[in-house]
Amino acid sequence: MIEVDPAIAAGLDRMAPSHAAASPDWDDVLRRARYDRHPVRRRVIAAVVFVVAIGIATAILTRVSGVTSRSGAGGACALNVRYRGVAYSGRTIAVAPEPGSRLGTAVIPPCDGAGRQTIQVARLPGVSPGVALIWIGTTDTLLIRTGMTRLPDAVTRLFNAPACRPEDAPVHLAGAWLGILRPNGRTELTMTPPYDLEIFAARATPRRYRRAFLTVRVPASLGRPLTEHDIHTVLDKGGSIAITATCRDGGYVAEQVRPHPPA
Amino acid sequence: MTVRPRSDLPAIEAAYAAGYHGYLRLAAAVSGHNDRSADIVQEAFARAVRARGSFHGDGPLEGWIARIVVNVARDEARRPPAPAIEPAASPAAGETPALAPIVAALPERQRLVLFLRYYADLSYTAIATAVGVEVSTVGPTLTAALRTLRERMSEVER
């Protein structure tokens, strides 16, 4: 700790006293981190990080500096893809489109120690491959031609999740359970509503909500529909959740919540 | 080839174990909520665990974590204080004047650098990472903060 005037040190110590009695709890940190796994949305990031890690490990092991490119001083590799000589950038989407016909192989150039990676891409129905591509196997990222400023409606409608329409209620949603957070974005620990559930609605009635990433508020009036046990047996295991929701101000409010462990 | 600082789970856990009490004080100072500092630190490290893939070793890991602690603490500072269980400590007669209002009047960057150095005991390099400034500016910023505190405390004492 730095040496400062005793008077200043006394004042600083009074502002934020030493918590000598407090003890660290690493298990609690890990538990909080798990509650917002968001596995689907992070799949692409995880894949890129994995490739970067493999590349770095390979470079270290072989002690060879590979030919790499960095996207900037920050060192983060943006998701850049080349297909038939055209550059595309990854963009997060809130509604996963159904892939059209398979187009072939695209390339993620080397970046930050990671080697070249190939991926399979498909057509986005109704949109020219010169504008956007679907990365087969991912649901939360669309590849959009770099530099495009005007995008067709078939693309822009994927950027925002559909608002909940009162005339559609009750809305039935079922799909991967992605996370659980308090309304202020903090980690949910008590399992006592209100909190927000995140779901990828693989199935939905009406169909307009299908394949959307949605946030559903669980109100206090529902009691405790989920427990710590559900976190361990469903969320942690990649299980699904079924929600019946009504609409309030365009948002989703749960009326019933049923977790389902993976088969 | 430069070997980058590790950002894997054991490295974050080691930073947590080594700096826990310093981060608690940092969280309390930035948020103004002593009673919530433990929760802030837990939340910040949970976020660090989740986001560890985005740390690329552009500075010390401790600085990157401190930045997350500061961000969570700032969010917490916007929330209303919990009902006081015990009255806040106040200086007894003959003690030095309360420093809090003088510190609060410091420019944001000076205040943050002071907290990171005094409470979290971070190196200048880690502070630079946490605040997002050049390492060479940390020392002068800290010196300026301490000089201002000395001057204003002496004014209050007069």
Image (tube, coloured by chain):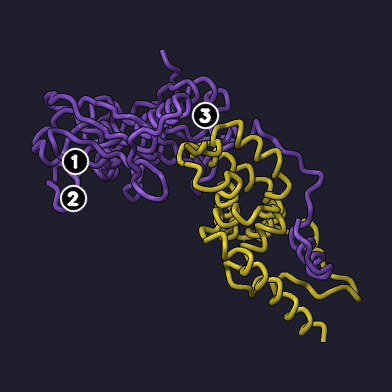
Amino acid type of the residue that numbered disc 2 sits on in the rendered structure? Gly
Colour purple maps to chain: A
Query: How far, Cα to Cα, is label 1 from label 3?
Result: 45 Å
Q: Considering only order in the chain, which callout, 2 or 1, is on the residue closer to the N terminus?
A: 1
Q: Considering only order in the chain, which callout, 2 or 3, is on the residue closer to the N terminus?
A: 2
On whether disc 1 and disc 3 are found on a single subunit, the reply is: yes
Q: Are marks 1 and 2 in contact (CB under 8 Å)?
A: yes
Colour yellow maps to chain: B
Q: Quadrant of residue B144?
A: bottom right
Q: Is residue A180 visible?
A: no
Tag 3 subunit: A
Q: Quadrant of residue A199?
A: top left
Q: Considering only order in the chain, which callout, 3 or 1, is on the residue closer to the N terminus?
A: 1
Image location (x, y in percent) of residue A29: 61, 36
Residue at numbered disc 1: A87
Q: Quadrant of residue A88?
A: top left
Tag 2 subunit: A
* Foreground of the two, A208 or B141: B141
Badge 2 crowding class, 10 Å Cα cut-off, few under 14, some 14 to 19, many 20 or more, is: few
